Amino acid sequence: MSVKLRLKKFGRLNHPTYRIVVADSRSKRDGRIIETLGFYLPKLQREAEQSKLNAERVKYWLSVGAQPTETVVTLIKNAGIALPARKPRKERKRTAKPFVPPKKKTPRPKAKPKADKADAKKPGKKS
């Protein structure tokens, strides 16, 4: 199960309100959630009060491998929470040998058919 930190939309027409939630990546945008971590009010005039996050829980979910969406990454950075550094992927040794196509066989030149001894008539002898 892959877990994501993402936004869940609420609010009325022309006044969106979002909750920052932890949800299974396969669930719908406004579907079942695991936990609510905060809110985001984009229409609020005072930018300091636009979003609020529970920093302790955000750090916990990031530490166990939850992937935040791009918008949530921006909100986390604005809240002053450090994102964990991604570990570089290690390349595995290749065990399979590279594919080498088989060599094309050139056909042998056809040999000239030998003349039958019975068919070959020697000149000078009558039969």
Image (cartoon, grey):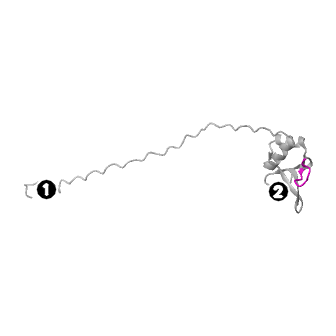
From the viewer's perspective, tell me whether residue 104 is left or right of residue 67: left
Q: Work out whether residue 69 can be spotted.
A: no
Residue 75 pos. (x, y %): 84, 46
Residue type, label 1: Lys
Mark 1 = which residue? 121
Local secondary structure at mark 2: loop
Looking at this view, is 100 or 82 the one in front? Answer: 82
For marks 2 and 1, give the CA distance. Answer: 97 Å
Q: Are marks 2 and 1 in contact (CB under 8 Å)?
A: no
Report the residue at 82% width, 56% height from top. 29
Magenta-highlighted residues: 39-47
Residue 36 pos. (x, y %): 89, 49
Q: Work out whether residue 72 can be spotted.
A: yes
Mark 2 closeness class: few <14, some 14–19, many ≥20 residues within 10 Å: some
Residue 39 pos. (x, y %): 90, 50
Mark 2 = which residue? 29
First in sequence, mark 2 or 1: give its number: 2
